[in-house]
Image (cartoon, coloured by chain):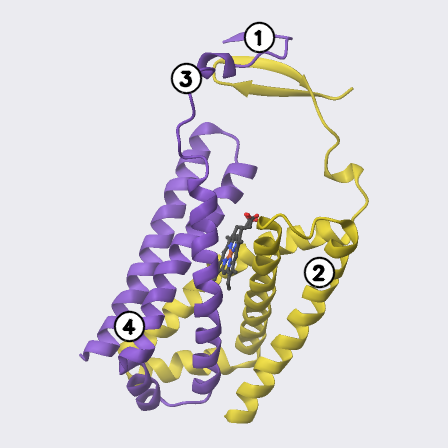
Amino acid sequence: MAVAKSTRGNVKVDRPLSPHLQIYSPLINMVMSILHRMTGAALYFGSLLLAWWLIAAATGPSYFNYVNGLLGSLPGRIVLLGFTWALVHHALGGIRHFIWDTGRGYDLKTIDAMSWGSIILSVLLTALIWAAALWLK
Amino acid sequence: MSTNSTMRTPLKNVRRLGSAKEGADHFWKQRVTGVANLVLAVFLIWLLVTLVGADHAKVKSTLASPLVSLPLLLLIGSAMVHMRLGMQTIIEDYVHGEGTKIVCLMLNTFFAIIVGAASVFAVMRLTLGA
Ligand code: HEM
């Protein structure tokens, strides 16, 4: 059996190790859990983008136009598209967590349905938001 | 440092001392700010969608309204608390060296406060005029 060389305080303990990530075959619930974490981390650094845009607006027209130009360029748009999807996907993941917090939705069928539902809905909502933005423009 | 091969950990030292009474605090704040973020993120998306392609004057006058700047300030506050707690969990999961962990947790706090303060400052400047 694999043994963990872990340290707790000033004591070294050899304890049996439970099966780790590579032992499991990837299931949709596991993918969703990882995606929730990845989108959360992406939004963490994405907060810099919002701060930058707000600072640009507060600075004045010429710097604002410069920043807007960068955000409106193709690479800028790709980043913003990713930001939109991450926000929508993470928000839907949050709703899933709130449902679980009430003690409901733990059977595998429901988890699978909510997982696939969030993926599909996150893509649809992202497309809808961008369609609205481009249409209103 | 001593080595042993038993299942015993320093847990025995804190047994019967009672809990620190803070166990649910992180969890609960993550939920409260998560719910707030949900509402405020809908607002943010609406705001940004309506401002796509807008020039500086339009953006400035929109953000000058308290009906826009107030929810924006609330979003910044809620999101900064939420993302700091969230990143703390991630750090605690992956960073195991005691020193590195403490440094990472500090940087996490600094990051949230600096990004939050800079954003709040920008919104205040837009809404109070300067
Ligand atoms: C839009 C509405 C949002 C909702 C409903 C929401 C909800 C949640 C919930 C319930 C968790 C805890 C998950 C768990 O206990 O495992 C969480 C984690 C997290 N959230 Fe959010 N959140 C939202 C927006 C945001 C935003 C805007 C950011 C960043 C600026 C963010 C960053 C994070 C991070 C970094 C984590 C930690 C991820 C992890 O531990 O795996 N969230 N979110």
Amino acid tagged 2: Met
Give the quarter of the image for residue B8: top right
Q: Nearer the viewer, mark 2 or mark 4?
A: 2
Viewer-closest of B45 and B117: B45
Chain assignment, label 2: A
Q: What residue does disc 2 label?
A: A114
Query: What hue does chain B carry in this figure?
Result: purple
Q: Is mark 2 within 8 Å of ligand 1?
A: no
Q: Nearer the viewer, mark 1 or mark 4?
A: 4
Image quarter where the N terminus of chain A lies is: top right
Chain letter, yellow = A
Left or right: residue B57 versus residue B89 is left
Q: Decide: few, some or many residues near mark 1? Use Cα within 10 Å; few <14, some 14-19, many ≥20.
A: few
Q: What residue does disc 4 label?
A: B123
Q: Going 29% across and 60% down the picture, which residue do you hit? A: B117
Amino acid tagged 1: Thr
Chain assignment, label 4: B
Q: How many marks on residues?
A: 4
Q: Which mark is residue B3?
A: 1
Q: Which mark is residue A57?
A: none
Q: Going 64% across and 8% down the picture, which residue do you hit? A: B6
Left or right: residue A121 versus residue B37 is right
Residue B103 drawn at (x, y percent) = 40, 37
Q: What residue does disc 3 label?
A: B17
Q: Decide: few, some or many residues near mark 3? Use Cα within 10 Å; few <14, some 14-19, many ≥20.
A: few
Q: Is mark 1 within 8 Å of ligand 1?
A: no
Give the quarter of the image for residue B129: bottom left
Cα gap from disc 2 to disc 1, whole angstroms: 46 Å
Mark 2 and mark 4, same subunit?
no
Viewer-closest of A70 and A80: A80
Under tag 3, what secondary structure? loop
Under tag 4, what secondary structure? helix
